[in-house]
Image (cartoon, rainbow, N blue to C red):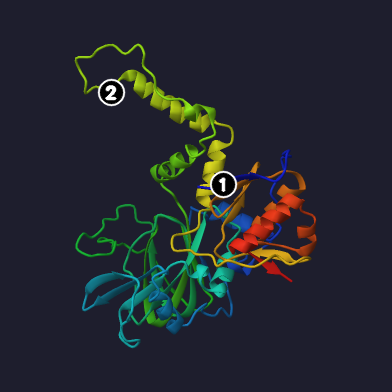
Amino acid sequence: MGRKFAWADCFTPLRGDNSSMDILTATPLLGGLSPAQFMRRHWQKKPLLVRQAMPGVQPPATRRELAELAANEDVESRLISSFDGRWTLRHGPVAKLPAWNKPNWTLLVQGLDLHVPAAHAMLSQFRFVPEARLDDLMISYATDGGGVGPHFDSYDVFLIQVHGKRRWRIGAQKDAVLRDDVPVKLIANFKPEQEYVLEPGDMLYLPPGWAHDGLAIGECMTCSVGFRTPWRAELARELLPRLMDDESRAYSNRIYADPSQAATQNPGEIPPALLSFARDAIDRAVREPLALERALGEALTEPKPKVWFESGGDLPAACGVRLDERSRMMYDQAHVFLNGESFRAGGRDARLMRSLADSRELGARDVSRLSEGARELLCQWVEDGWLHALP
């Protein structure tokens, strides 16, 4: 659970300013659309094929580097194969891969942006979508004929070809039925409507629910930028413990009392008064000022499993700072959130910390403008490895 810390005594409402990206300017990444136009026309609505979205793109990692990552127990990976028509799935760590020249297998390395700076830089190009929704960059290495079969995702995805060629077949299929005889989620009645061959630099955007199947034409690598789409029940399970975490609230110290409870002939029945007491506890937790906002921000910035930060040193004088690639930083109108912790912010401190969240770095001049308490906090974050000093 996040700790609560205030570096400003008063709060002045300020709007966040995403100065790191002009959302109104057309970009080759989106086929000549501006981010604003893309979000309005395509996001969660319809696919978009962009030829040479990233001209000259290079794979963020070599196949040998991917093999080393897959063998690491701190990296999420999967090996999927369809040798002789028989689908198999193996979760990492994967100590040994099939031969590079053997067809019909795929290695998936999740969260490549957490381990490879080039992958983090590629993911950062999609920060016209709120950080709360941006999840990670996965890479798929496949030998000839390799793929994960026809399937659909419950989230938006950008598929970026970074090496070799891959043939994609897609369809807006509403009657998809999953096979129950394979270890991966494959559509049994796949009905493709369109087909594209992507070459290095090409990109295909698919909204949630679009069925798709990608087959490698020779050796290839595809990066996919995915987005977080929590289920309502999943979000509730995450938020409720955080709402009840602050033991300083007056209502949390009240215990249940029932001096009017009569003798009962039905001892197995839950007393209605106890049910009302429980409902009141939940209602009060949700109604507590800023409690839900604080719980949501802490949950959204919680580092991913298996993420570890190496302790840093001191923050030198007259230096800027940048966020570690694994750090997650967001804000709302009353807080700044970093790696599962929440901090109250106001005035200039809030404006500068929001700039750090938006741009993921803060120059030396801006660091010098922070209050003493906020600078002390930056020093602690550098020591924790959440931030790094910039010259």
* Secondary structure state at the residue bearing disc 2: loop
In the picture provided, is 225 more to the left or to the right than 126?
left
In the picture provided, is 175 more to the left or to the right than 276?
left
The residue to which callout 1 is attached is 3
* Vertical side of 60 occupied by 180: above or below: above
Check disc 1: other Cα within 10 Å, few if <14, some if 14-19, many if 20+: few
In the picture provided, is 216 more to the left or to the right than 52?
left
Say which of marks 1 and 2 sits in front. 1
The residue to which callout 2 is attached is 270
* Vertical side of 249 occupied by 210: above or below: below
Check disc 2: other Cα within 10 Å, few if <14, some if 14-19, many if 20+: few
Query: Looking at this view, is 244 or 160 the one in front?
Result: 244
Q: Residue at x 36, y 13 (%)?
A: 259
Q: Position of residue 173 (x, y in %)?
A: 35, 56
Q: Which mark is residue 307?
A: none
Q: Position of residue 304 (x, y in %)?
A: 47, 59
Q: Position of residue 59 (x, y in %)?
A: 51, 79
Please state which amino acid type lies under the numbered disc 1.
Arg
Q: Residue at x 49, y 79 (%)?
A: 61
Quarter assignment of residue 6: top right
Please state which amino acid type lies under the numbered disc 2.
Ile
* Secondary structure state at the residue bearing disc 1: loop
Q: Residue at x 40, y 43 (%)?
A: 237
Q: Position of residue 114 (x, y in %)?
A: 51, 68
Q: Residue furthest bottom?
A: 101
